[in-house]
Image (spheres, helix red, strand yellow):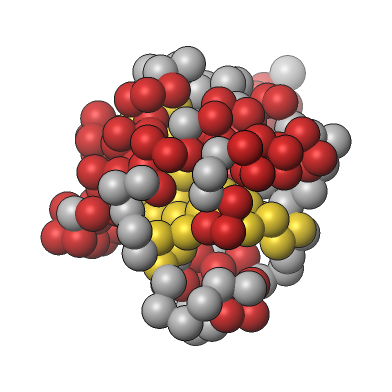
Amino acid sequence: MVIPNGVDVAAFAGAVPLDLRELGLPLGRRGIVYIGRLHKQKGLQSLLANAARFLGPLPNHDLILVGDGPERRSLEQLARESGFAERIHFVGWRTSVPSLLAAADLLVLSSRWEGMPNVILEAMAAGKAVVATRAEGVLELLGEQAEPQTVALHDEAGLATRIAELAADVSTRERLGRLNQARAASTFSLAAMVQQYSRLYETLARLGESC
């Protein structure tokens, strides 16, 4: 039996957006956010190598990398080589994830492999659109809205193109965000998770009594 993780939808849906100037962005900039470890698992080398493909067509957007890890130095070097270093922000580990997501236009996850990425659940709860590779667990989380928000693993150009398209399309981005939030509330809430565990424990208890 598989019980998916739950997310506190209210905490993310009601978060006050962070002022992105606190992260070093100039006034009026818009954010595309990655949240997670700076590790080769997350495919960030490919994301930054293709940064020009999405930052070029999006003159008002910056890429915000939230988190830390062993790849930080090499990623910072790639950012410098991209030609968009002033629009790529390494902000380190942060506790204000709900506020960060509330302030962002969309979440990007370029992972090569995953289990069940909680950050996608959190973005869904925050009412945000997602652009992600089809790593394990991603399709299950996004459900019927997976197709417009995902690309094949290792499709680096496709990921960059999808980021550029979705970030520029406000109405589609907001519609997907609403659908994501509704799915998080109906399927992945903390209450839904607790209920499934409760049913499991009751089943196990009955089995124990019959032994």
Which of the 4 quarters of the picture holds residue 64?
bottom right
Residue 190, image x, y percentages: 54, 58
Taking 158 as reference, is 186 above or below it?
below
Which residue lies most toward the left here?
171
The residue closer to the viewer here, 45 or 143, is 45
Please give left or right for residue 192 compared with residue 2 in the image.
left
* Residue drawn at point x = 37 percent, y = 36 percent: 53
Residue 14, image x, y percentages: 45, 79
Which of the 4 quarters of the picture holds residue 162?
top left
Taking 171 as reference, is 203 above or below it?
above
Which residue lies most toward the right here?
70
The residue closer to the viewer here, 8 or 133, is 133
Residue 115, visible in the rendered structure = no
Residue 72, visible in the rendered structure = yes
* Residue drawn at point x = 43 percent, y = 72 percent: 29
* Residue drawn at point x = 39 percent, y = 55 percent: 106
Taking 17 as reference, is 168 above or below it?
above
The residue closer to the viewer here, 80 or 193, is 80
Residue 159, image x, y percentages: 38, 30
The residue closer to the viewer here, 170 or 57, is 57
Please give left or right for residue 107 compared with residue 143 in the image.
right
User: Which image quarter is the N terminus in?
Assistant: top right
User: Which image quarter is the C terminus in?
Assistant: top right
